[in-house]
Image: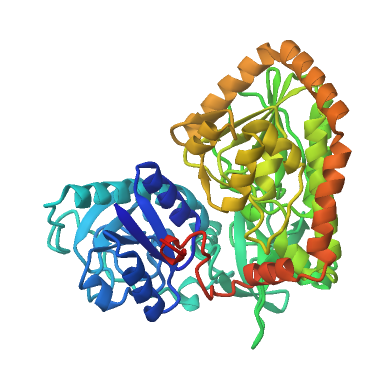
Amino acid sequence: MKILFITHSFNSLAQRLYLELTARGHEVSIEFDISDAVTLEAVALYRPDLVIAPFLKRAIPEAIWRERVCLIVHPGIKGDRGPSALDWAILNGEAEWGVTVLQAAAEMDAGDIWAEARFPMRQASKSSLYRNEVTEAAVAAVLESVAKFGQGGFVPEPLDYGRPDVRGQWRPAMRQEDRAIDWQHDDTATVMRKIRCADGFPGVLDEVLGLACYLYDAHPADGLTGAPGEVIAHDGGAICRATVDGAVWIGHLKEKREGEPAFKLPAAMVLGERLVGVAALSPALSRKRERGHLPSPVYGRGAGGEGERCRDIRYEEHNAVGFLHFDFYNGAMSTQQCERLLQAYLAATRRDTRVIVLAGGADFWSNGLHLNLIEAADSAADASWENINAMNDLARAVIETDSHVTLAALNGNAGAGGVFLALTADRVAARAGVVFNPHYKAMGNLYGSEYWTYLLPRRVGAERATEITDNRLPVGARQAQALGLIDACFEGDADAFRCEVEKLAETLAADAPALLAEKRERRRRDEAEKPLAAYRAEELANMKRNFYGFDPSYHVARYNFVYKVPHSRTPRHLALHRRVGK
């Protein structure tokens, strides 16, 4: 079928649905919801069989849904209505939640129901739930709905609050006063729910050390206490604030500025000199693992051992395998984070193991450069240059490792330089639900580095490498394996993925001597043909023009990304219906 996505942005959910539908032979075109006139034009140009709205912030024009079936993906159970569905579910401590696909109608979220998929709620942030449980449920419900539509004759279920399976209700948009923290009375669990239900948008408005700001990125702080509301420590950019029965780490803040925009930054950076006199903790980079299997999912820093510190990097071992976890907020890797990760990696190479698993984080493996910190720097060009060189130093260390077999294990999505950082490993495995964005051009025609001109062609060939980077489209894990971009794709959830990764790592450990001999010979040949230093120099020459040249496209694109400037048009590579001759 011809399917038109009307969406606020091409976010992670929209990308995943795009991949699932195109993999099943459907043609999907995308139009950003900029105005009614633009949306009406898109429908007229494309004449879709079906319209799907994966992520909307306003209603579809009546002139469209009156004429054709429009399916809305709503992150709530049957009967749930309103724009803050997931926010309320987290705040109210719902044990189960879901996604409903319903038909657009005059009343918001009150249309006939095509499908519903439910999931147990996990104690996690809104953004983490959205990228994981909500996305998986949405895929199931949308595929079911599309199949019903394609078969014809299906009559959707009218919304009926008298039915026993309709447990939802209308809830208004959540206000700041609904999630305001009362530090003198709220326990840690309550504080966590309030911050998590606002992460990553809009944050919880609060006052920290006299500064009005929005709170994000919260994790429990085991073993730390203090006067309720007091900032009692900081570590690695995060601050620790006491509750009535414990404390929480708050990783990021956004200053509230009247009349001017702001963006999220590490909490300690936002507070600056206000933290003078607050205790600083030393980061813990490693701990020895005792158990014989990978630990439970780590959804955020501070989970599992030494919880008094806010750790974004940790290392553990099982037999001959070392697991290096790096859980950076939104997958962004700053210069300092790259440097710390490099030191942790080099330490891992000195361990008496045979395999190093680069495990990334639960929600993201890596998204490359830390654009927010670059935007906040005195010189964005200089900060960009330092950041890409730090990424390159890390990438080169992994490429040149001949003491261990390396395995990149992607449980979460990867984008831009993060994809090519994963390709530095000897083997790359991903969970089936992972989405790759192996290109840089969407960020103002950025050229990119991380040795991609060496790594990508050797995996997929020169011609296909050009296609992948020029297309600027997401690539699903199954597709990535078929292309040769990665070596293995494992079905199932995060727990199943960890088990498969552990088995693969043990197999690689058993074969390590032969694999390492082969790797040394391959690197010797590659280096003789063209040194890594030459690839780096060529890539950085292009990057230097991006950062310091006359064309400001990268700086404009970065600004728009960081400040969340609304789209003014849909990129042509997404809007099939706007291509000449289509």
Q: In the drawing, does residue 241 fall left or right of residue 86?
A: right
Residue 236 in the image: state x and y as whole percent.
77, 54
Residue drawn 49% across and 58% down?
126
Q: Quadrant of the C terminus?
A: bottom left
Residue 456 in the image: state x and y as whole percent.
68, 38
Residue drawn 20% across and 73% down?
66
Residue 97 in the image: state x and y as whole percent.
34, 53
Total tally of numbered discs in the picture: 0
Residue 401 in the image: state x and y as whole percent.
81, 27
Using the image, determine if residue 395 lies above or below residue 72. above
Residue 79 visible in the snapshot: yes
The foreground one among 544 and 307 is 544
Q: In the drawing, does residue 482 fall left or right of residue 259?
A: left
Residue 192's quadrant in the figure? bottom right
Farthest residue toward the bottom? 259
Residue 412's quadrant in the figure? top right
Residue 548's quadrant in the figure? bottom right
Residue 365 visible in the snapshot: no
Using the image, determine if residue 39 lies above or below residue 478. below
Farthest residue toward the front? 581
The foreground one among 332 and 269 is 332
**Colour theme:** rainbow
